[in-house]
Image: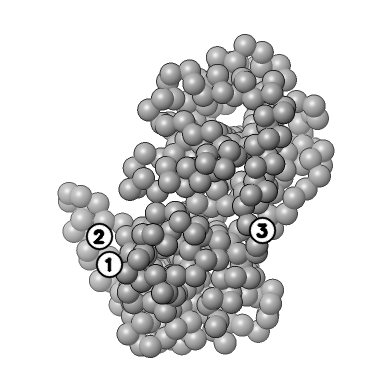
Amino acid sequence: MKILAVSGHSGGHIFPALGFLDALKDRNKDIGTLLVLPKKNAAGLAESRKHKMNFISISNFRPGPGAIPAVFNFFRGSIESLSILIKFKPDAVVGFGSIASVPMVFIAHLFKIKTMIHEQNVVPGRATRFLAGFTDKVAVSFEGTRQYLKRNEDKVVFTGNPLRPGLARIDKNKALDFFGFKSGRFTILVMGGSQSSRAVNAGFLSATAGIPDKTGLQVIHLCGNKDREFLENGYRELKVDFRLFEFLQQMEYAYSACDLAVSRAGATAIAEMIHFALPAILIPYPLAYGHQKANAGILEEMGSAIVIEENRLGSGELGGRIGDLIHNQPELERMRSSYARFPGHDARVLLIEAALN
């Protein structure tokens, strides 16, 4: 059997695709797998020795002059998708969102190849909405997504969001040692998404400056490649123990070490926080059709997270919330325990069953 997965360039699309393909290989090493990505791929996100990889020339549509090359790339990527399908001859094609999935899944449907698309967010993106009518199944990460796909509700199957490979809980002291941190200090993990966020980076640094006692604080910060120097200087000036990473492959250590996450509300981050039962302060990306606000609302409603809108980062609210939680262990434990209300399941297994049956 051969399975093809196609994904956009962000970690929110790539990590679930890798989780799905890795689980396939774990189940049966003889299954042929292929991961197809846009040529403009996020560096380091798709590192995998288990799967063949192909790239297609496709890019997101942007208003203005950038729309013309995007249209050209779409048709070019469609031809490349057709060529890949002819050469690989998959038994099933699974799309993990973004415009990169559209030509591959649509052409596979025309060829009567089994197709499925996986939606990571609560509110489905344009690719999912379009492809829902041309796929055999639509796998969703949240039950609430069904209400947005009523025209194709009979195809919707709940699977959850597959986690990236290797995300297992680790003893906290061992995780702290990985970063050279001391036990007994309050550890915060800061994540601005796979593309990073200047608003989150600068907002967190400003919030940290407003915390009266910073001596017991230590920070793991995924900063991207643009703000490293700015953050290094800021943390040193504040005399806060910190570790900066443009990208961290061993995220299981970061999740296991920290007491609190301050993060964007991308679908992958939400799934991983649920897995690690991690108290969080979420700062949803304000654009992208409100996907992240809806994602964050799931954790806020369950009592697992506090949501702060990006336009309030300069209000002092973030620093105040962090300061309150540092000295309120019972509230942190309550936030952790609220994750028990989420259904326990292995999304990779459910997604495999949906794809193969």
Instruction: Look at the numbered discs 1 and 2 and tell me whether their residues touch, using CB distance below 8 Å.
Output: yes
Q: Which three-letter amino acid code belongs to the residue tagged 2?
A: Ala
Q: Please, is residue 126 above or below residue 139 in the view?
A: above
Q: Secondary structure at mark 2?
A: helix
Is 319 drawn above or below residue 136 in the view shown? above
First-in-chain label (3 vs 1)? 1
Residue depicted at 36% across the width and 82% down the height: 109
Q: Which residue is disc 2 drawn over?
A: 70
Classify residue 263 as left or right of residue 114: right
Residue 148 lies, with reference to residue 286, above or below; the image says: below
Label 3: state its secondary structure.
Answer: loop
Seen in the image, is 37 located left or right of residue 220? left
**Quadrant that contains the C terminus:** bottom right
- Point out residue 313 in the picture as x, y percentages from the top left corner: 44, 25
Say which residue label 1 marks: 74
Closer to viewer: mark 3 or mark 1: 3
